[in-house]
Amino acid sequence: MITRVLTAIVALAVVLPVIVWGGFWGLTGLVALVMLIGLQEFSRLIPVQRTRFVQYFDLVAGMLLYAAVLFAGDALPLALGLVVLALFFVHLFAFRDIESAGPAWMGSLSAVFYLPLLLAFLPLIRLEKFGLDWLFFLMMVTWAGDTGAYLAGRLLGRHKLYPTVSPKKTIEGVAGGAVASIALAFLARATFFGELTLLECLVLAPVLDLAGVAGDLAESMLKRSAGIKDSGTIFPGHGGVLDRIDSLLFSAPLLYGYIVWMNM
């Protein structure tokens, strides 16, 4: 537990200055770095042995797709199509065992679309009105929900949520996480984000937390299928990058959609 806390403090000491003072470009660069590490970790989840060339091409394709989401504008559909075609031809000619090419191609598509597309919503939120406040709100309710679920699950957990995917997750833990997310939403409203409404604290916060639970279950499904416990070891006590951002991957797009809808 001490290792987890110390790791979290060090990570926040690095990440928070970039988010606060780095602006859109600083956050874009930070997310790009996280994405590249996450893509490397995702390679462990693909059930087909792939060459270094194919793995590196995934990184290039992921970066191009990430940049396209942020900057391509109306050309985004074209960029998406070109990435799909490029990945197809790389896998078609990179595998002598053609039976492995199809599953490897689908694995690369999953990785390249899963991480770059969903992570791109973080810089996009930063560009919106009150973008920095929204980002802190998102991180607070998502990670508070994760911590609340862990504590409530250990103290009160009796009924398993989805044992075949995540044996330790309980319904009581999820409920505790939702309560924690609401509490942190009110803390955000009282300290730095007075524009938050009561309804957003009471409804939006737990909805984002539940989206985070879904993101955690999604990664647990992938890891269980691959037979591994953690996606990586970069964060002592926490696992890999994917283990830390899995909740944000699902909650960030939801929040961005809400912000855009509210500003229409």
Image: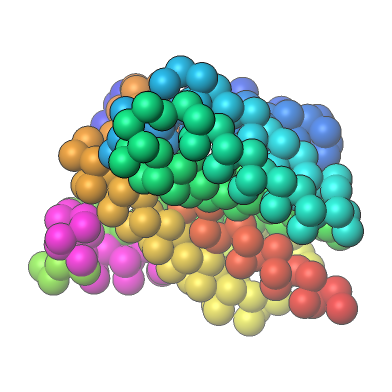
- Residue 107 visible, this angle: no
Q: Picture coordinates of residue 156 (x, y %)?
A: 17, 64
Q: Picture coordinates of residue 160 (x, y %)?
A: 15, 67
The color scheme shown is rainbow
Image mark count: 0
Residue 4 relative to residue 79: left or right = left
Give the prevailing secondary structure in the magenta stretch. Answer: helix
Q: Nearer the viewer, residue 242 or 18?
A: 242
Q: Which residues are magenta?
A: 162-184
The residue lying furthest to the bottom in this view is 199
Q: Nearer the viewer, residue 37 or 170?
A: 37
Residue 150 relative to residue 15: left or right = left
Residue, x 51% and y 47% (percent of image)?
109
| Residue 200, quarter of the rendered image | bottom right
The residue lying furthest to the left in this view is 158
The residue lying furthest to the top in this view is 52
Does residue 192 show up magenta in the picture?
no
Q: Nearer the viewer, residue 212 or 17?
A: 212
Q: Picture coordinates of residue 111 (x, y %)?
A: 49, 43
Does residue 170 show up magenta in the picture?
yes
Q: Is residue 128 above or below residue 132?
A: below
Quarter of the image containing the N terminus?
top left
- Residue 55 visible, this angle: yes
Residue, x 58% and y 27% (percent of image)?
57
Quarter of the image containing the C terminus?
bottom right
Residue, x 28% and y 53% (percent of image)?
221
Q: Picture coordinates of residue 133 (x, y %)?
A: 74, 53
Residue, x 77% and y 58% (percent of image)?
77
